[in-house]
Amino acid sequence: MKRLLALALIVPLAGCVSTASHIVMAPVHAAGWTVDKMTTSQAEADRNRGRRDRKEEERERKQAKKDAKRQRELEKQQGSYADPNS
């Protein structure tokens, strides 16, 4: 009978202990989450740097293509204005 009474008291208290541990750990988890969001890991920094470099290379490639097209158009214009008698 005493064992049954002890078991009957322990089972509900197990839930209380679990809840209490969650309450106690909540500020620790919140602080960890905040620090994680406020800082940048090395992997994130590397990924961001790579992304930035690829975008810059793409901009340079587009600008070079645009410049080459402009140069061809200028050469074409200058060729059409050339004096055929000279």
Image (cartoon, rainbow, N blue to C red):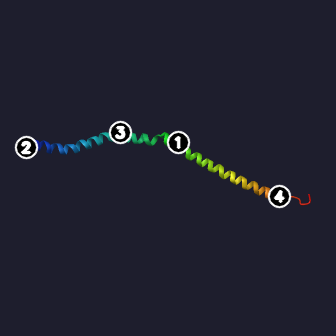
Q: Is residue 80 above or below residue 58?
A: below
Residue of label 3: 28
Residue type indicated by callout 4: Gly
Residues marked 1 and 2 touching at CB (< 8 Å): no
Lateral position of residue 47 relative to residue 3, left or right: right
Q: CA distance from mark 3 to mark 1?
A: 28 Å
Please state the horizontal and vertical placement of residue 74, each as a whole percent of the image.
78, 56
Q: Earlier in the sequence, mark 2 or mark 3?
A: 2
Mark 2 residue element: loop
Eye-nearest disc, 2 or 3? 2
Q: CA distance from mark 4 to mark 2?
A: 110 Å
Asked which quadrant contains residue 34, the reply is: top left
Please state the horizontal and vertical placement of residue 44, each as a whole percent of the image.
49, 43
Residues marked 4 and 3 touching at CB (< 8 Å): no
Mark 4 residue element: helix
Residue lying farthest left?
A: 1
Q: CA distance from mark 4 to mark 3?
A: 75 Å
Q: Earlier in the sequence, mark 3 or mark 1?
A: 3
Residue type indicated by callout 1: Asp
Q: Is residue 84 above or below residue 11?
A: below
Please state the horizontal and vertical placement of residue 78, each as a whole percent of the image.
82, 57
Asked which quadrant contains residue 81, the reply is: bottom right
Residues marked 3 and 1 touching at CB (< 8 Å): no
Residue of label 4: 79
Residue of label 2: 1
Residue type indicated by callout 2: Met
Q: Quadrant of the N terminus?
A: top left
Q: Residue at x 62, y 50 (%)?
A: 58
Q: Earlier in the sequence, mark 4 or mark 2?
A: 2
Q: Earlier in the sequence, mark 1 or mark 2?
A: 2
